[in-house]
Amino acid sequence: MSENESCLVSKLSNYIDLDQTDFDFLTTLEEEEEDFPPRHVVRAAGEESDYLYVVKSGWLFSDIELVDGRRQVVQVYNAGDIIGMPDIALHRSALNLHSITDVVLCPFPKQHLDKIITGSKRLSALLFTLSLRDQVIFTDKLRTLGRMNARERIAWFLLDIVHRLRITNRTMTDTFRLPMNQTEIGDAMGLTSVTVSKTMMQLQLDKLIDRRGGNIILCDEKALREMCDYIDRYRDMDTSWFPEA
Amino acid sequence: MSENESCLVSKLSNYIDLDQTDFDFLTTLEEEEEDFPPRHVVRAAGEESDYLYVVKSGWLFSDIELVDGRRQVVQVYNAGDIIGMPDIALHRSALNLHSITDVVLCPFPKQHLDKIITGSKRLSALLFTLSLRDQVIFTDKLRTLGRMNARERIAWFLLDIVHRLRITNRTMTDTFRLPMNQTEIGDAMGLTSVTVSKTMMQLQLDKLIDRRGGNIILCDEKALREMCDYIDRYRDMDTSWFPEA
DNA sequence: CGCATAATTGATGGTTATCAAGACCAGTGG
DNA sequence: CCACTGGTCTTGATAACCATCAATTATGCG
């Protein structure tokens, strides 16, 4: 990715060839810019969800809480992601949106989607399909939370993160920085921070992962994949049914 | 719903006013018809997913399995539902599709969606939004599987079913037939059939539910809702951003 | 009635939550 | 330079919840 190419364009170019019109549409989505510090609530559940966000840089996650404080982290976002698609189905956002690191977001109003639907059939189809792909990943995650033990859940979580990062960063190998603490990881996988700690320690003793200087290293990705039956949903998407350019 | 009105049309009419063009499109989706007996595999995971289905009558569910046989039921379908949206993002279906009762399905090829996208902006926006709504429900389900105990999960499951049924059946009260066995309910909520049995018995002793002649009765829906913080995502959908008719 | 499937119930064990104490680490200020 | 601080991670002890196993009862159907 070149210095000044948008991560959004880079991410979407993976799937279809964008023409000038598409390119112009995507540029309008990244006109505005807003910065947030780490550990900041960008948007709280229950607020009106008139805006979506393109992530320009940084990490965020969305979560949903129960009255007694139990929390479920729903999704982790990186550069190039579009945040808030599911919310456009609702009047009010269902999720809290937290920054993890310093982030730069590009907010744009729901109505811009209307323009895309009207103006570019291929781009509409792509955004639609990306949302559906997210839904498939939610399906995988349901299986993970519903039927897997702590060890398998952590393996799945790490693999999912690394596969997401590889979409925009082709050169990435098996080492990455994970800016989430163990409480957040636990909230993402339905575990406590204590169990996350013990489980990661065990994975490390078994030489499946390693941790150095705040980085995670997947030492035996194959074994991790087999452990949790991981399927990479980010790679092969079916765009064959899209309207012609 | 009148005798000869399609459940699909009935369901979608809840959300927008359909014009003649929309109506014609929807009719093409229900041209073909196929019957299946109860407990039949309509489509297995890994098969090519060139078709979607409109449910004309009956119950079905989709599931995903692990190598060792553990199973997660992902979604339950009733009359008026469209099955397979998430699969159009993939070359091959991620899920198995099982009939629960006798069912009548209307299969239609993916390509028909292309026609809808090209032909009706409002209908495209609606189908898109319905998929996003499903995703929001998956989010709720993630929270349920990740952070709730058996009692809360069963409460959530029963409430979700009843709210789905109420979309097309306005006259429905608090009594309904649930054609799933306890193993299937367990697979849907990440529990064993034994735990489902014990938990439902406990809910019954606490006079929150009752079971008579194969029917489930929600005796205290308010208490059930509060127990699992249930939110009805089927009611209020935001269609204000849709293109003009 | 007899059979198969499903549901119930009790006993036991395993996994993870909970609680609590201590170690580690980076940043801050004396 | 070092003590102090807040956050995070680690580790062990205990408890709660659910899975597993197994036996029995209920239900529905030919």
Image: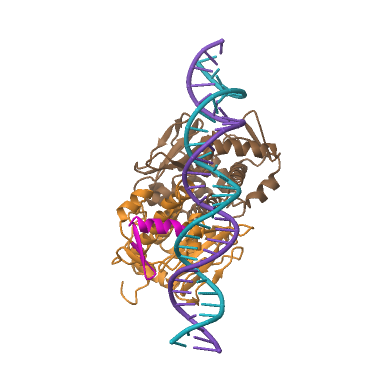
Chain colours: A orange, B brown, C purple, D cyan
A182 and B7: which one is in front? A182
Rendered-image quadrant of the C terminus of chain A: bottom left
Give yes or no for residue B94 being in the magenta stretch.
Answer: no
The boundaries of the magenta stretch are A196-217
Can you give x and y, in whole percent of width and height, for residue B7 in the image?
55, 40
Can you give x and y, in whole percent of width and height, for residue A155 in the image?
39, 55
Q: How many marks?
A: 0
Residue at 43%, 41% in the rendered image: B70
A65 and A52: which one is in front? A65
Residue at 39%, 71% in the rendered image: A24
Q: Is residue B217 left or right of residue A109?
A: right
A237 and A183: which one is in front? A183
Give yes or no for residue A207 being in the magenta stretch.
Answer: yes
Q: Is residue B244 left or right of residue A240?
A: right
Position of residue A39 relative to residue A238, above or below, is below
Can you give x and y, in whole percent of width and height, for residue C17 in the image?
55, 54
Rendered-image quadrant of the N terminus of chain A: bottom left
Q: Is residue B67 left or right of residue C29?
A: left
Position of residue B119 relative to residue B197, above or below, is below
Q: Can the viewer see residue A78?
A: yes
Q: Can the viewer see residue B59?
A: no
Can you give x and y, in whole percent of width and height, for residue A132 in the image?
44, 54
Query: Would you identify the image quadrant in which residue A25 lies?
Result: bottom left
